[in-house]
Image (cartoon, rainbow, N blue to C red):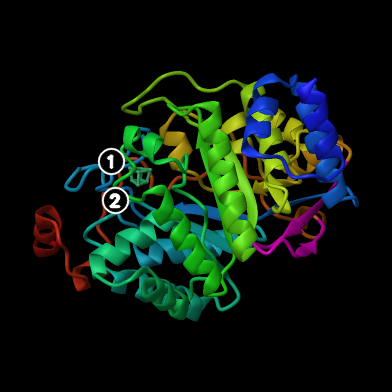
Amino acid sequence: MAIERIADKVRAGGRVTAAEAVELYRLAPAPVLGRLADEIRARKHPERIVTYIIDRNVNYTNVCVAKCNFCAFYRPVGSAEGYVLGFDELFRKIDETIAVGGVQLLLQGGHNPDLPLSWYEDLFRAIKERYPAFKLHALSPPEIIHLSRLAQLPVPEIIARLVAAGMDSVPGGGAEILVDRVRRLLHCYGKATADEWLDVMRHAHRAGLRTTATMMYGTVETDAERIEHLTRLRDLQDETGGFTAFITWSFQPDFTEIGGAEATGIDYLRTLAIARIVLDNFDNLQASWVTQGGKVGQLSLAYGANDMGSVMIEENVVRAAGASYCMDEAEIVRNVEDAGFVAKRRNMHYEILGDPIFREREVPRMLELATARADGDTSVPDELVNYPARSRAGKQLRVIS
Ligand code: SF4
């Protein structure tokens, strides 16, 4: 039977073709996929260590001109619910992150036409001046493309300037499905085509940065398009070796324009497992407990994941679409250990930083994820007046403030 032949090839360490991956994904029972993925995980990580990072997922603005139809987070330019975080607010968030052992900000936001490149450079410099050892895992490829268009500078130059200002690595957001047919249907083709997304990562890797890769599935794509997404990532990883990890999660439909139903837990586990099988040149796969919940997140460790992602501290994007799972470090470690693994803290480069920090010193329990802003807080940061706005609403706001 074809499935057994493909499974034997995977067990022998062979690389599956796209057609074989589609066949396996469609036809192999979930436990078979899980077993194959777990065997690869065990080959790559025989010491049974499961890692996680303590960082904070901060969205510096929700104002966005891209208007992806799967996104419940963004607000249009001029919306009363639009916000931009101030430098002082961000410093406060970093202080809170460091207090619980955090080592970096995952900083992403909307494509706000009223934040020029100089705003990002000044912010990064200010952060690095105050917190020299703190890392900035910042700006997904579509945000870098947005800045390139706004500043009318090529992508490599934008990357060089952001690195000079303090950017340490690039998160793999905004990939959705790297197939242009899907991107057109999701209204995200304009913000970045599949080739453009991959090209930003290529430039980042060439500039010496490490990045992650993601996939959001469960909207309009076919199984074959999910596999095409994975093989395109695999090809770029062959070329550059710059991806540290892969993270997949299911589309969260609540309050989005396209709506629909969320993919099931089994769909998630099957997708994670096939990713582990196809992405044979990726060392690390994260469990997306933020979208799937702690229990499926824990099960992910039997379906190819070797990392529990981030303790997060704050989350705004997934919450806007109706999902709001929260696990602090103690809860993540409890899930890892209960699954028979050893939990270790890491940095973005997957270097081990140590044992769980709550066993070394007292840290406050975190039973709820923070938000970017308290409800109803519409304050405008003082420093915004120093940066030229492009939109009419932004210009008016500058005059008022
Ligand atoms: S997914 Fe990102 S780029 Fe798309 S609308 Fe939402 S914030 Fe904007």
Q: Is residue 263 left or right of residue 191?
A: right
Residue at horizontal 32 percent and vertical 42 percent from the top: 74
What's drawn in magenta, residue-wise?
341-355
The x and y percentages for residue 198 are 47, 56
The x and y percentages for residue 366 are 62, 44
Query: Which one is nearer the viewer's eye here, 381 or 5?
Result: 5
Is residue 98 shown to the viewer in this render? no
Assign a secondary structure to mark 1.
loop
Query: Which one is nearer the viewer's eye here, 84 or 232?
Result: 232
Residue for badge 2: 83
Query: Which one is nearer the viewer's eye here, 314 or 256?
Result: 256
Q: State how many labels appear.
A: 2
Q: Is residue 228 left or right of residue 391?
A: right
- Note whether ligand 1 is within 8 Å of mark 2: no
Residue for badge 1: 67
Q: Residues within 10 Å of mark 1 (few under 14, many from 20)?
A: many
